[in-house]
Image (cartoon, rainbow, N blue to C red):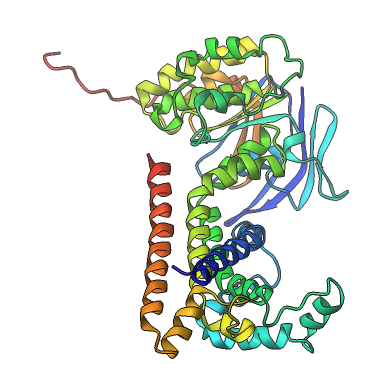
Amino acid sequence: MSVELSGLRLPLAHFTLEVDATLAAPMTAIFGASGSGKTSLLEVIAGLRRPVAGRVIVDGEVLTDAAARQFVRPERRAIGYVPQDGALFPHLSVRANLLFGTKPGAARPPGLTYDHVTEVLEIAPLAGRAPATLSAGERQRVALGRALLAAPRLLLLDEPLASLDLPLRERLLPYLLRVRDEFALPMLYVTHSPDEVVALCSEVLVLERGRATRKGLTSDLFALSSSPHYVLRQPGA
Amino acid sequence: MTSEAWQVIGFTLGVAAFSTLLNLPLAVGLGWLLARRAWRGKSLVETLVALPLVMPPVATGLLLLKLFGRHGPLGEWFATHPNWEIIFTWRGVVVATAVMSFPLLARAARVAFEGVNPRLEQVARTLGAGRVRVFCTITVPLAARGLVAGTILAFARALGEFGATIMVAGFIPGKTATLALSIYHLVQLNRDADALQFLGVSVALAFAAVWFGEWFLRRQRA
């Protein structure tokens, strides 16, 4: 699997997104501060935005080519996208959300069955519920399951843990690891958290104000922080 | 009530329903275009659509009379192609009520569509749904409350239209007489008792329309 972004240019409100990179790791982090253009980059790859210049090529297939006016619509890209808040359809049940992207009668890739995906994410018991009644962590898992069940060739995750508090984040992380290892699906993982990059991704692309400034192995680009982390002292300790 | 009275009530309801049905696809389509797309001339269209709301209805009626009259640009076309006489016929009533209620529906549709999070539509696209499927399964259901409220408002407006209708269709008993036109006509003839009867019917219809709308919205919220 490879995602080739060549000469991408997209003017944003305060700067221009400019990326030239080939991402080939099973799970690549797109790392940068908030407002560095990470979400816009995912939108370009998913086909939700058109760049003014450049090309997006996934597995050798040209999906966007600004110069040649070539553009594959998002629904034909088979690229899953999980936005930050999950974006579950509020008028549909959890089950209907999960099944939204499945094509009836189409052959499922082995492992990506409804039963297996809901089991891995532990969301089977939620099937009959309405999205509004779910906790933040449950919502994220359902959103992840919905994207998986559409059988994408590439999954884009936009800060899936950012809206969760710390304990919840630590509980959701294992699910992401499971998805990575269980379904062998290439993923681009957008985050501003170095901890998440180190925990999940083998390679990183660093974005700064719209520019891809560095790219490499996580182990080369990140070091253990020496800054102390404070915790609340237990009473009596 | 006399059979003429029933005829007037039936005619008014039929015309209001028909003009609302005519308006629905156009107003919903335009509302979507206004809410979701940027295009040249958008602000001009927006203003034009709102005009019947702020212009005197009689002025709108005069404009329609000139447009749809036998020598008007649209009237000539309709007279030769489908061979339809518009002015002083039931079709004139439909045209007048439709034009007068269109802005209410189009604006309600626009607001309803603007209230739908575009993120949901985008995610639906990435899940393999084309534009039409996204519109039918995501956009419309999520905008349903506003669309229904707008439809009821437009229907109620069409029920009570007077100014434009009297210009375009006149008052012809049995042919173009609606509730509103009849009330005015009966009062002119000093037949207040008959006018009061129609007044009662008008109140009942308006009450029913608004009550149904509120009931629907309550049900949606639950």
For the question of whether residue A206 can be seen, the reply is: yes
Image coords of residue B193 (percent x, y): 36, 79
Which residue, as the protein is rendered here, is positioned at the far left? A236
Residue A90 to residue B143: above or below: above
Question: Residue A153's image quarter?
Answer: top right
Comparing B50 with A57, the one in front is: B50
Residue A201 placement, left or right of A153: left
Residue B138 placement, left or right of A138: right
Comparing A11 with B192, the one in front is: B192
Residue B119 to residue B53: above or below: above
Instruction: Identify which residue is drawn at 53% across, 49% down.
Output: B143
Residue B58 to residue B100: above or below: below
Which residue, as the protein is rendered here, is positioned at the far front? B2
Question: Residue A126's image quarter?
Answer: top left
| Image label count | 0
Residue A1 to residue A66: above or below: above
Comparing B180 with A224, the one in front is: B180
Instruction: Identify which residue is drawn at 71% across, 70% down.
Output: B40
For the question of whether residue A39 can be seen, the reply is: no
Residue A75 placement, left or right of B19: right
Question: Residue A197's image quarter?
Answer: top right
Image coords of residue A194 (percent x, y): 49, 27
Instruction: Identify which residue is drawn at 37% across, 39% down.
Output: B222
Image coords of residue B103 (percent x, y): 56, 70
Q: Quadrant of the N terminus of chain B?
A: bottom left
Residue B70 placement, left or right of A171: right
Image coords of residue A8 (percent x, y): 74, 45
